Structures are given as C-alpha cells and as structure tokens.
Image (tube, grey):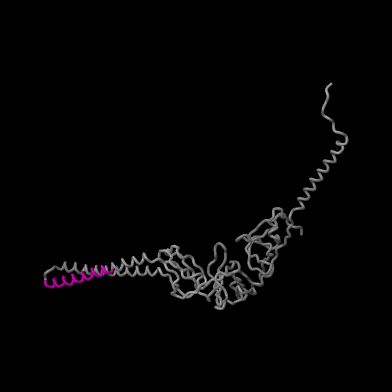
Amino acid sequence: MGISTASSPSPQRAALRPRLWAFVGLCVLAGVGTAAAAATAVPVLQVGAAPAGRGIELTASIEALRQATVAAQASGNVLALNVKAGDRVKAGQLLARIDDREPAAALSRSEGGVLQAEAELRNAQVNAERTRDLRSKGFVSQSALDMAETQLKAAQAGLQAAQGGRRQAALARDFAAVTAPFDGVVLATHLEAGDLAAPGRPILTLYAPGALRAVVQVPASRSAAARQASARQVQLPDGQWATPLRSTELPTTDPVAQTVEWRLDLPAAAQATPGQSVTVRFEGTPADNAARSLSVPAAAVLQRGELEAVYVVREQRFVLRAVRLGSRQGSQVEVLAGLKPGEQIATDAVRAGLADAQPAAR
C-alpha cells in the first residue's frame, strides 16, 4: 500500500483563505482611492471682459538718437586701443591705431611713381617744344609734331594718375588712425590690442549723451488706441515720469510679431543710458474707455523664453494655449489675443503644468 506525502489543508487554514482575499481586495481599493485623491486640484476662473480705460502700458528700451559703430577702414593688427567702455571722447580724438607699415610702403611707391611721371612729363615738354621749332622751319613733318603732342598729353595724364595714386595711398595710411566722428561716450569696444582689424569690422560703438529716445513695440491691434491716446508718458529707470518731446509712429508693421514701432524722444534732462528698460504709458481716450479688454492674474501666465501662454480648461483637463499680452496693472495682465470671454483658465500656471493636474470643482 502506497503512502501519499501531500497533506490536505487544515480546517483552520481553509477558513482563513476567504478572509485573506477580502483583505487584499480592500487594500487594492484603498490604493486606487489614494491615487485618485493624489490628483492635483488647480483652481480655475472664468475670463471676463472689463473696461479698458487705464490705457496701454508697455515695456520699451532706451536708444541714443545719435549712435555710430566705428569700423576699421584698413587691414592690420590693432596696435593700441586708447579708450574703454564708458569713456567720454571728443570729435577727432584718437581712439585706436592700426599697423600702418603696409600703407606706408604703398605711399612710398606712389611717391616714386609721381617723381617718375614728373620726369617723363618734363621730357615730353622739351621734345614737344623742339618738334614745334623744327616744324616751323620745315625740318620735320606734321606727323612728327602730332606724335610729340600726343606724347606730351600722355605724360600729363600719367602724372595726374600718379598723383591720384599718391593721394589714395596717403588716405589709406590715414585710415590706420581711427578717430572719433563726434563728441560722445564709448558704449562698447569690439576689438582689443593685438586683434586683426579688417575693413568693415567694428572697433567700438559711440553714442551722443543727452539725446535719447524710448523705443516701444505696440501690438498692431492697439496701434489705433496708441495713436489716439490723450497723453504719452515714459517712466524712467529712476521712477520719474517724463513727457516725450516728440512721438513718432513708424509706418510699417512687423510681419512676424505684428507690432508697430513707436519712438518717443526724451527731454535732455532724462537720466538714462542706452539699453535700459523703461515703461511707456499711452493714456486712454473716451473711445478707449468704452472698449473692453480681458485680463488674467499674472500667476496664470506661463512664460518660457518668448512664449507666453495660459492653461485653458478642456474636457476636465488643462490645455496650453499661447496668448499675446498687453499692459500689466499690479497682479493683473491684459490679454490682447488668444482668449475669449467665458473661457476657464487655471489660476496657477505652474501647478496646472503637472501631469496629474485637474480643474478644481467650483
């Protein structure tokens, strides 16, 4: 009779098995509930239109009315750079010196050519005088006189060409000394002593202080409002507001950014330097006050480089949408394009970008 080694489960273990499976099921359900509860709820708001009577505020940059990039007109190593950024210079002041050995040698050759041309001209003049005398006495033909006259004219032309070459060589040598075209301030230097200069390569940038302007890009959709503004103001870096002496709207629209450039000339007393950022305000008009605009909290805007976008609610999830912004008033940002009244957006763009973000129940 065979002996079986398998043992049947005890009655106690058989009774515990249904309870064990029930406990596992409860754990699974609890895990699902925890995962659902872990979803990030982001508050949302409904975008509405509000009166746009506050006008337009945009960020602008300061430029110099008179600015020049001084470039090299000769080739050679920069022997000396006599100024640095921030230095004040006078018109005609030596800014840099370029190696002039090659143009000096060219000038010497040109001077030698002038001496040779002058000798040839004297010889042609003597020959022409002699030939005229002989022709008057009938010893030479008319053709011989014509040839002598032609040689004289050729010698005169050769001297003029040699003198022109000498002037050109002298001018090229003078190009080795780079001077300031006007009184100004050195904004930046682009080469250092020892660098190789070449015709057209920038050496430094100058600007004339005291004549500045604010340059602002106005959205094309708001250009009419900017044109009809009752007043225009520029907030300088020190916080003071200045009234432009003159405002100029360029007659073209950027085909990519869809903006119109405005240039506002600042008073001579304006304390600013080229490159600084300022705020330009176009005061509202009665027509502008009657218009309505959209505004959202600044925290609802996602900025990544040049991208400006908000998260819009679509079927209980967030969808990123690019927008074009306008002026900023405190914690609110004006939306010029990309949103419509009645749409819902996330109030916190950072949290709305999470993978498990969901619109919070209102």
At x 65%, y 68%, the residue is 328
Left or right position of 196 against 327:
left
Position of the C terminus by quadrant: bottom right
Camera sees residue 194: yes
Left or right position of 10 against 86:
right
In-front residue for pair 249/6: 6
Position of the N terminus by quadrant: top right
Q: What secondary structure is the magenta-colored segment mainly? A: helix
Write down the region rendered in magenta: 114-137
Left or right position of 69 against 40:
left
At x 65%, y 58%, the residue is 321
Quadrant of the rendered structure where residue 281 is?
bottom right
Q: Is residue 129 magenta?
A: yes
Camera sees residue 157: no
Q: Position of residue 264 (x, y in %)?
A: 56, 73
Q: Position of residue 102 (x, y in %)?
A: 36, 64
In-front residue for pair 24/101: 101
Quadrant of the rendered structure where residue 200 is?
bottom left
What is the number of callouts on the image? 0
Q: Is residue 217 magenta?
A: no
Query: Hey, which residue is sitting farthest left in the picture?
Result: 138
Query: Hey, which residue is sitting farthest top in the picture?
Result: 1
From the viewer's perspective, is residue 241 above or below residue 104? Answer: below
At x 22%, y 71%, the residue is 122
Q: Position of residue 252 (x, y in %)?
A: 53, 67
Q: Position of residue 198 (x, y in %)?
A: 42, 63
In-front residue for pair 2/207: 2
